[in-house]
Amino acid sequence: MAASRRRFLTTLSSAAAGSAAAIGSRTGAWAASPISPTPAVESLSPAAMLERHASGAPAVGAVATAQSDPRMPTAAEVQSWYTDRRNWGRWGEDDEKGAINLITPQKSAAAAGLVRSGRKVSASRVFEPEQHFLRKSPREGGAGSVVDNYGFIYHGQTITHVDALCHMWDAAGMWQGRNPDVEVTTQGATFGTIDAWSEGIITKAVLIDVPRHRGEPFVTPDRPVHGWEIEEIASAQGVTVEPGDALLIYSGKDAFVRDGGDYGGGDRPGLSVTCAKFIRDHDVSLLGWDMMDSRPDPYGLAFPMHGVLFNFGVALLDNALLEPLANACADERRHEFMFMVLPLNVARGTGSPANPIAMF
């Protein structure tokens, strides 16, 4: 074990021994420092852009009232999913691909066998960079050309993107227990970066259409998606989620916003932490979603569902546009298809914008 990692884990062990904080406490092992509010003054500086795009963690001490559903797990059970069932070391201590290892060449080839009609559906939102500068270059005879310069932060609530394994962590560390203070610097990340998936993510995908199953236009704040509901919907749709599959959960974000809902970094509808158990039980390789972690979380977790990234090594496709894909599944009368996610091959990157394509 590297000396820096040994010191990091020893420090964590000592800190844990002196704390009896419960998982529901904001000072517990899953808590993260609250993110500063967005500055009132508009600015295009990198710091201001980061603040504006940062997802708002629950306020200190803010723990949602636990639901009365008897299927809700205890705090200890939830904690065990993210401690006892971690995938750290499963593919070797230095592995940087995580659950994408489950997508074997045979798995990708089998996904290609799902292509029948050739219908293609993009799961990407329209990308509008916050800074977009153009320069025209005239040429002789009236010819010319134009080039672009983009300035943007893709992490956040707007751009469809893939999170690399180094993107998030908790007090136990990032993917594989690595120390983020060592592995993530101002010059970029050195472990668990997006270029680990430079060959692309091509596998079978299963779309879970929550609104259609519920007979409602979108998921509401009082009824987050639960793991047992995914099981029920998959059964009703006649699909099975298998190891290495991409799991796409459509919750109706766009319909929610059209109805006047505010979907941002604070309280919001989405997926309950109980979905994490489903993901681990079924060895999902990638989670794609239009609504993300439901907030507030009844267990007070900073990253209720984003925890699958650094604990299980599951790639996250954030802000996916799934409404057209859900409609296509209804048209095609099937909810499984070939799915291709091709992140940019960015050195030291914590993620990448992407244009995922479903092919029927």
Image: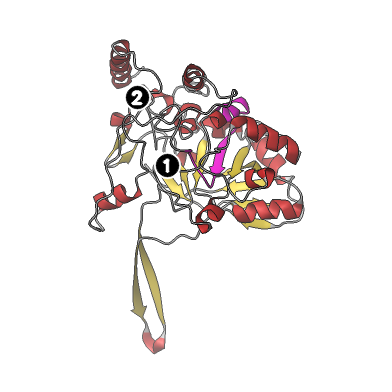
Q: Which mark is residue 235?
A: none
Residue ID at (36%, 37%): 57
**Residue 203 appears at what percent x and percent y?**
64, 41
Q: Which residues are magenta?
A: 277-294
Point out the residue furthest to the top here: 17
> Which amino acid lies under the numbered mark 1 shown in the image of this protein?
Asp
**Residue 187 appears at what percent x and percent y?**
28, 42
Q: Which residue is denoted by mark 2 in the rendering?
A: 171
Q: Which residue is denoted by mark 1 in the rendering?
A: 267
In the foreground, 258 or 112? 258
In the foreground, 249 or 155? 249
Which of the 4 image quarters holds residue 108? top right
Left or right: residue 251 versus residue 119 is left
Callout 2: helix, strand or loop? loop
Q: CA distance from mark 1 to mark 2?
A: 23 Å
Callout 1: helix, strand or loop? loop
Alpha-carbon neighbours of circle 2 within 10 Å: few (<14), some, or many (≥20)? some
Alpha-carbon neighbours of circle 1 within 10 Å: few (<14), some, or many (≥20)? some
